[in-house]
Image (spheres, grey):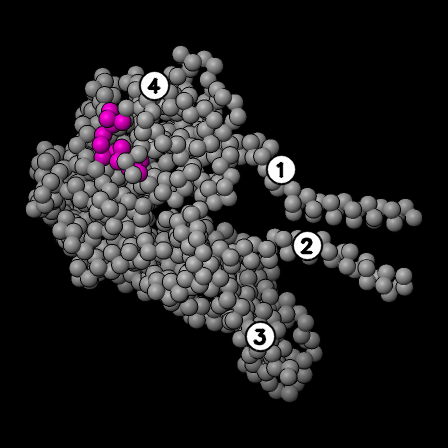
């Protein structure tokens, strides 16, 4: 009898669990959500929950910003939750598709390239900041443009992706050049000198990841042109600047001045193992370069080469970077806006604090005049690199990323792989444009 | 209540929880996915489009490319792997072989490695300055490193090699357990009748292992059609989409590009249909019971 009772009890317990697992989600997730993922905005009016991903960089910056703000507002707390970028994207996608916006934090950091896509796909997840206290004219125009959709500002620009060209001064010297020979030059001069250096030292000037379109988009943005026109339609086939960029890329590979590798680790390896004499990338690449401590003092930075024969071409461009967004789930938008306006978008002393240890370069233009930015960097030959990059950032032409930026980047990456293998530029660009057009007509 | 009825009820009582869970967690999402596949739009902004997504699939050049790639893997890799696994299993089934345990473990061990880490290891093995190129240069076969992952054909071959390495041992274990069910006396009788090892393999081992072969064939086909990690981590789909798989493209459409969940769900359903059709054909071919 006892046994029977026990088995009945067990059966009941099992059935009960099943029912709970099956249907109990709507009530449980609210209470469970807050504690388990730590991400949901707290109901507390004076707490801001923030998602960002790099402890040495943007998390550090956010925590410093919180300290700065708490000086005047001691009752405000900022709760930073470390969330890798891929997870931010996945969580946002999940929250928006399930309609559970209450799982979002008050503020999150977003990659510039993904900003427009997400605002347009999930408009209900963002807060419009156009009429807030934040003065967007204090930021570099090219940078702010990433987070503007339909003339409305949705993001506070944060870190800088201004393109720098880095050179190994010791290798240049071996071939009889200095960094000055590479400042304010054109791509044809770059290729000329690159061939010379290759012949004399056996080292290419540049490396890149095969099939990735970073080099192409950097070149293209430096001419003031984009993969999309103002209406957001792909602009590849009759884009003279893009064609010129493709030709230049092809020539860089053919002459051996640029080498292609297969992944990011190998790319960083070409620099740290001294296989190449330089690189061109967003200024955040300095972090990777500086991991090779034995090369301290042997690097120098300057601006990138300019595309000749294209109207409006410059020596400046952008690659990467991120901006802060305030979500629609934020309970106290006024507080979040005020917090942003008095730190990331209004405090030079804040940027001075975070610069030395994080190297977080501001796109907030007034910060560029600060003394902290004029400090020389030993690794880069005693140059005041931060001031230089802030100056570059102010000159970057804006880039229309459009919503379908990732589609376009992949299509162009496919095109350049085929072009390097001998395909015709015009027909490949046509194919790339068709691919993007196809993705857009859904 | 008769005893029979009672037994029946008890049986159903035990079955019900599992049945409900499978229905709620597996079949319900499938139906929801099918409804989703009939909608179009960006992110959450969805409208009904009927079978538009299914038509769209066949106009999508990248998706066509991914189907071709997946079937190349399927047609070349699955037979190689299964034949290799069968040969290894029948070799290891030899009663007089010493150190069987070590060999079995060594061949099965790749299955214990994570998909991502083995893909990354293969990527570094075949890098321009990687292990394989270094060996080839040292042996004087190549002058400079060959970019294996930078060329369409060699990149595909490397994915196939990687898959064979990773999954042969897994299938071999199924064959080994299948071989336990074949009476040793059958082999002894064959030996007495003067059959050579080749004849024993083709006349005894293969026919008696048929159900297991069928099982592994269906599982491998299923697995290959859903191939994802290798394409993402080993080659990133490149060069120029020449190694991208269907699942990888579906991932891109939902998470990397402007999210188009309806279209992604429709493509997933195509994979589902392909798996079902191929499994059905294999079962018809394999089943000779009449």
Can residue A340 be seen from the camera position used here?
Answer: yes
Answer with mark 1 or mark 4, whichever residue precedes in sequence. Answer: 1
Mark 4 crowdedness (10 Å alpha carbons): few <14, some 14-19, many ≥20: some
Question: Bounds of the magenta span?
Answer: A136-149
Q: Residue at x 49, y 21 (%)?
A: A45
Q: Is residue A386 above or below residue B42?
A: above
Query: Are labels 4 and 2 on one chain?
Result: no
Residue beneath disc 2 = B20
Q: Is residue B44 above or below residue A372?
A: below
Residue situated in front as seen by the camera: B246 or A275: B246
**Predominant SS along the magenta part:** helix
Res A27 label:
1
The CA distance from mark 3 to mark 4 is 69 Å
Query: Are labels 1 and 2 on one chain?
Result: no
Residue beneath disc 3 = B283
Residue A209 in percent (x, y) is at: 28, 48
Residue beneath disc 4 = A342
Residue situated in front as seen by the camera: A62 or B44: B44
The quarter holding residue A304 reads top left
Residue A214 in percent (x, y) is at: 25, 45
Q: Nearer the viewer, mark 3 or mark 2?
A: 2
Q: Is residue A405 above or below residue B6?
A: above
Dot 2 lies on which element? helix
Q: How many marks?
A: 4
């Amino acid at each position: 009898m006892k046994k029977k009772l026990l088995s009945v009890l067990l059966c009941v317990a099992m059935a009960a669990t099943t029912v709970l697992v099956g249907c109990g989600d709507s009530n449980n997730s609210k209470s469970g959500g807050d504690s388990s993922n730590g991400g949901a905005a707290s109901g507390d009016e004076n707490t801001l929950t923030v998602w960002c991903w790099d402890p040495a960089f943007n998390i550090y910056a956010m925590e410093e910003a919180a300290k700065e703000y708490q000086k005047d507002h001691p009752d405000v707390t900022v709760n930073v939750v470390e969330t890798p970028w891929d997870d931010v994207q996945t969580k946002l996608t999940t929250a928006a598709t399930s309609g559970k916006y209450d799982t979002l934090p008050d503020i999150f950091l977003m990659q510039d390239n993904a900003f427009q896509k997400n605002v347009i796909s999930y408009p209900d997840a963002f807060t419009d900041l156009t009429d807030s206290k934040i003065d967007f004219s204090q930021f570099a125009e090219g940078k702010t443009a990433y987070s503007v959709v339909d003339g409305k500002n949705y993001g506070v620009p944060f870190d800088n992706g201004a393109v720098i060209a880095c050179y190994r001064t010791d290798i240049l010297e071996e071939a009889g050049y200095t960094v000055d020979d590479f400042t304010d030059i054109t791509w044809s001069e770059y290729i000329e000198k690159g061939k010379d250096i290759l012949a004399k030292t056996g080292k290419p000037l540049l490396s890149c990841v095969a099939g990735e379109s970073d080099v192409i988009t950097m070149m293209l943005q430096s001419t003031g042109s984009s993969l999309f026109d103002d209406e957001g339609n792909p602009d590849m086939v009759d884009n003279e600047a893009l064609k010129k960029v493709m030709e230049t890329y092809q020539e860089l590979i053919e002459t051996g001045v640029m080498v292609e590798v297969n992944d990011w680790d190998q790319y960083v390896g070409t620099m740290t193992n001294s296989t190449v004499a330089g690189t061109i990338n967003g200024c955040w690449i300095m972090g990777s370069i500086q991991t090779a401590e034995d090369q301290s003092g042997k690097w120098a930075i300057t601006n990138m080469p300019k595309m000749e024969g294209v109207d409006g071409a410059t020596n400046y461009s952008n690659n990467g970077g991120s901006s802060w967004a305030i979500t629609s789930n934020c309970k106290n938008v006024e507080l979040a806006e005020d917090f942003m306006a008095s730190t990331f978008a209004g405090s030079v002393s804040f940027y001075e604090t975070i610069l030395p240890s994080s190297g977080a370069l501001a796109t907030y233009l007034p910060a560029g005049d600060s003394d902290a930015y004029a400090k020389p960097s030993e690794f880069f030959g005693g140059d005041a690199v931060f001031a230089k990059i802030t100056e570059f950032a102010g000159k970057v032409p804006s880039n229309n990323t459009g919503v379908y930026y990732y589609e376009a980047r992949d299509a162009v990456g496919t095109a350049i792989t085929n072009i390097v293998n001998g395909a015709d530029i015009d027909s490949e660009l046509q194919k790339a444009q068709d691919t993007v057009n196809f993705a857009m007509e859904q | 209540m008769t005893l029979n009825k009672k037994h029946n009820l008890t049986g159903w009582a035990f079955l019900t929880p599992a049945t409900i869970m499978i229905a709620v967690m597996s079949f319900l999402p499938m139906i929801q996915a099918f409804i989703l596949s009939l909608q179009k739009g960006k992110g959450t902004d969805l409208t009904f489009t009927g079978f538009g997504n299914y038509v769209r699939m066949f106009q999508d050049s990248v998706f066509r490319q991914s189907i071709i790639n997946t079937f190349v893997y399927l047609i070349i890799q699955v037979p190689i792997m299964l034949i290799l696994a069968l040969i290894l299993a029948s070799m290891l089934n030899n009663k007089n072989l010493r150190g069987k345990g070590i060999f079995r473990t060594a061949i099965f061990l790749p299955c214990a490695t994570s998909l991502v880490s083995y893909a990354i290891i293969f990527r570094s093995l075949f890098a321009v300055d990687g292990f394989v190129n270094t060996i080839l240069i040292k042996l004087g076969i190549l002058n400079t490193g060959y970019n294996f992952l930078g060329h369409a054909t060699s990149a595909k071959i490397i994915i196939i090699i990687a898959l064979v390495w990773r999954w042969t041992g897994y299938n071999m274990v199924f064959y080994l357990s299948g071989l336990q069910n074949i009476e040793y006396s059958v082999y002894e009788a064959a030996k007495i009748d003067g059959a050579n090892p080749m004849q024993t393999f083709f006349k005894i081992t293969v026919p008696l292992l048929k159900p297991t072969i069928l099982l592994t064939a269906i599982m491998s086909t299923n697995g290959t059609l859903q191939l994802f990690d290798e394409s993402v981590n080993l080659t990133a789909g490149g060069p120029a989409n020449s190694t991208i798989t269907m699942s990888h493209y579906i991932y891109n459409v939902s998470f990397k590009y402007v999210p188009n969940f309806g279209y992604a769900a429709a493509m997933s359903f195509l994979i589902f249909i392909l798996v079902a059709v191929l499994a059905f054909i294999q079962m018809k071919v394999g089943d000779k019971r009449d």
